[in-house]
Image (spheres, rainbow, N blue to C red):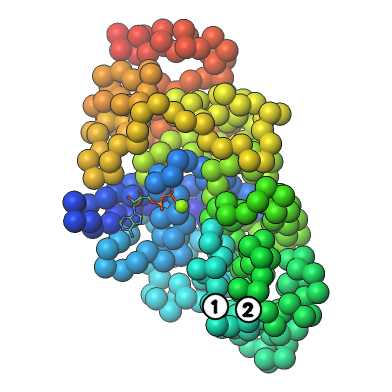
Amino acid sequence: MALLEIRDLQTWFDTRAGVARAVDGVTLSVARGETVALVGESGSGKSVTACSVLRLIPRGSGRIVGGQVLFDGVDLLALPDAGIRAIRGNRIGMIFQEPLSALNPVLSIGHQIAEAIRLHRRVSEREAWARAVALLDQAQIPSAQRRVHDYPHQLSGGMRQRAMIAIALACEPDLLIADEPTTALDVTTQAQILDLLKALQTENGMGLLLITHDLGVVAEIADRAAVMYAGRVVEEGRVDALFAAPAHPYAEGLLASLTLEELAPGARLPEIPGTVPSLLDMPGGCAFAPRCAYAADVCRAQAPLLRQVGDSRRAACHAPLQAVQWAARPHARAQMMAREAA
Ligand code: ADP
Ligand code: MG
């Protein structure tokens, strides 16, 4: 059984202009000890997916409309509020992009880590502080014994992100969700933080759901990746297979220009011509059809479901590229589409 299994998740927002289907049928899983990267352009629904797992969607404007989020077999969406609070920060840790907005500015980081521990564990204040120092040390913050008394503004961006990691790991979570944990940092610090996350993940055997738009990071640390487009996962599979021969035209656009060897940390998503459709006014068929060089009538009429393509990936495409055909594309693909249409 997967540690985390998101099934057909739908999270919508009520806006003045109408209902924005930010997440509209996301299916995704993370196994114990596995690193899964969630990639996609800005606005594709990555953060909303992550927040939905922990039920952190702001009440009022947003709502989880459908689907299941099975964590160790238990549907988090069906738990009472107390049930999800007991899991959040405990069995599931979360790291956000902007540590400054996630940390409390008027409490020392030691205080915040100790608080995170004491919320879920019956330990004395003293034990919690000792553990906070150990966690900062584990997060490679130098002079942890002294830095534990620092306030967030006294730390550099990289150190703040390490403090966030220490908080997220305070209760030794089974699953860590990291939403663009290194985006705000310089390249050297990014690399250090990722090495740290990777080391801690291996050490603790946690599942890691890593949201990033850095393809170098995906290539370096993820076992599997899921590519999101307009609120859906359009392709998901093992990273090596995905980079070698993407099956979905959108994934092809993102990944085809790069080889695994060429990818260094900092490799950003390439630009694909056209714009993401408005979530308020999604096209009836495949959301990528207006930008897809291969789109046929069926693509504009009917939204494709995520289905198995080959052994190591799934794609939501009416005519996914097969690895063998890939070498000869787009010629082979055009022929295949013509066959399908006939
Ligand atoms: P990203 O993939 O960049 O993390 P998000 O998951 O943050 O994207 O957002 C996906 C879409 O959800 C946004 O483009 C926006 O339209 C919508 N959205 C997110 N948060 C809100 C909100 N609080 N109110 C209205 N719409 C929102
Ligand atoms: Mg985001």
Give the residue at x 73% y 57%. Answer: 196
Q: Residues within 10 Å of mark 2 (few under 14, many from 20)?
A: some
Residue 278: % across, % down: 28, 41
Q: Quadrant of residue 225?
A: top right
190 horizontally vs 324: left or right: right
**Mark 2 is on which residue type?**
Tyr
Q: First in sequence: mark 1 or mark 2? A: 1
**Mark 1 is on which residue type?**
Pro
185 horizontally vs 79: left or right: right
The tag on residue 151 is 2
Residue 226 can be seen in this image: yes
- Inter-mark Cα distance, 1 to 2: 7 Å
Give the residue at x 55% y 29%. Answer: 255
Give the residue at x 77% y 65%. Answer: 140
Residue under label 1, please give it: 105
The tag on residue 223 is none
Residue 230: % across, % down: 36, 41
Residue 66 can be seen in this image: no
Residue 235: % across, % down: 48, 35
138 horizontally vs 44: left or right: right
